[in-house]
Amino acid sequence: MIYLDNAATTWIAPEVLEAMTPFLQDDYGNPSSIYSLAGRSASALESARQTVADYLGASPDEIIFTGGGSEADNLAIKGTMRKKPGGHIITSAIEHHAVLHTCQALEHQGYELTVLPVDGNGLVDPEDVRQALRPDTQLITIMHSNNEVGTIEPIREIAAVAREAGAKMHTDAVQSLGKTPLNVDELGVDMMAFSAHKVHGPKGVGALYVRKGFRPVPLIDGGGQEKGRRAGTENVAGIVGFGRAVELLGEEGERSVEQMRGLRDKLIEGIMAGIPEVVLTGHPEKRLPNLASFCIRYIEGEGILLSLDMQDIAASSASACTSGSLEPSHVLLAMGYPHEIAHGSLRLSLSRYTTEEEIDRVLEVLPPIIQRLRDMSPLYAEAMKQERSGQNE
């Protein structure tokens, strides 16, 4: 299988699995206990916390381990707003549903919500954020990079607006981890969410960076784990895996990013040159180095995915979290694409393990797939008819 859906999830790196295994078998102690078996778990947990903190330029006590990116987003948003019920939230129209639906749920509970538009490249304008500010604005939550089209947002500038207004700034950086620099002080954010399974770590583990001096209201009541900020016995093996995955990111450094960027550019150039009536979605330059996204006119994304799967190529249409829905991507609609074009979305996302031979294979099989699907499409037939009619006039 040629796997090009790494924005949905990644396989566990061998080094990560190796690091996790002892804590699934021999070192299975509860880190809250006091005997030596538990001590080994506690030590491994804190070592992983230190690794994640170092990678972000943070302090270990600013890292809260969670059950995933969605929980981290929920903790940041609900935990901030519930400190002062009835306040105002600012977000964008292209957020991951872990953010957008969380904000909407709070709106139903009486909080005020402003959803900002984006431009045709998926960018939020910091000036729009400034204009949306109110005296009761408690939180601005804008994603660091978009999971469907790869656009990287101007978070540093937006965080500066938040800081001037005295509002907290949260960013969902789940897709950005390991793809672009994420120093918390340079960005100026108060909270940042991550997920292990996007960086060749295990599923079911995430983290929330929370700047020292701020304490979100916990989502889960119970024991005193994570210094009372997230109750529940820690997933030690998963957290160890997360730490090892982040450690590998530091070791790989810019080399793997440049490798992904080069293959991504080859993929984009090949598709744009080899298939007519294709639109590259997302910002042409300010985009993740591993993500290429397109709208292919006159056909449905589902047909493309099924045809690619028959060639042992895994891809996605919009995002994995919305697959199965008949509605087009809310991200593409917010960027101004009409329904008939948005339905033909294709997302190809690479990892540091993607090879040039795999990209060559995709560029070989995709054009005939698109042509075959278009030959069966009444929309394409009508478009060709109109084109021929215009040429004859």
Image (cartoon, rainbow, N blue to C red):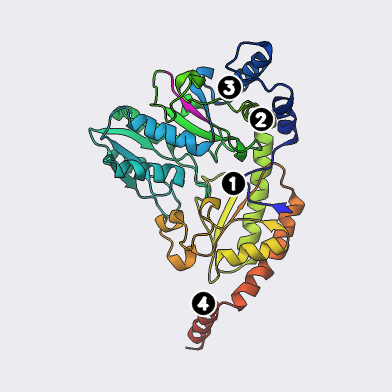
* Mark sitting earlier along the chain (3/1): 1
Looking at the rendered structure, the kind of residue marked 1 is Ala
In the picture shown, does residue 99 fall above or below 364? above
**Which numbered marker is on residue 379?**
4
Q: Which residue corresponds to mark 1?
A: 7
* Mark sitting earlier along the chain (1/2): 1
Q: Which residues are magenta?
A: 207-212
Q: Which residue corresponds to mark 3?
A: 49
Looking at the rendered structure, the kind of residue marked 3 is Arg
Magenta-span inclusion, residue 211: yes
Of badges 3 and 4, the one in the foreground is 3
Q: CA distance from mark 2 to mark 3?
A: 11 Å
Q: Which residue is at the far bottom?
A: 392
Q: Main secondary structure of the magenta part?
A: strand
Residue at image coords 36%, 50%:
117
**Which numbered marker is on residue 295?**
none
Q: CA distance from mark 3 to mark 1?
A: 24 Å
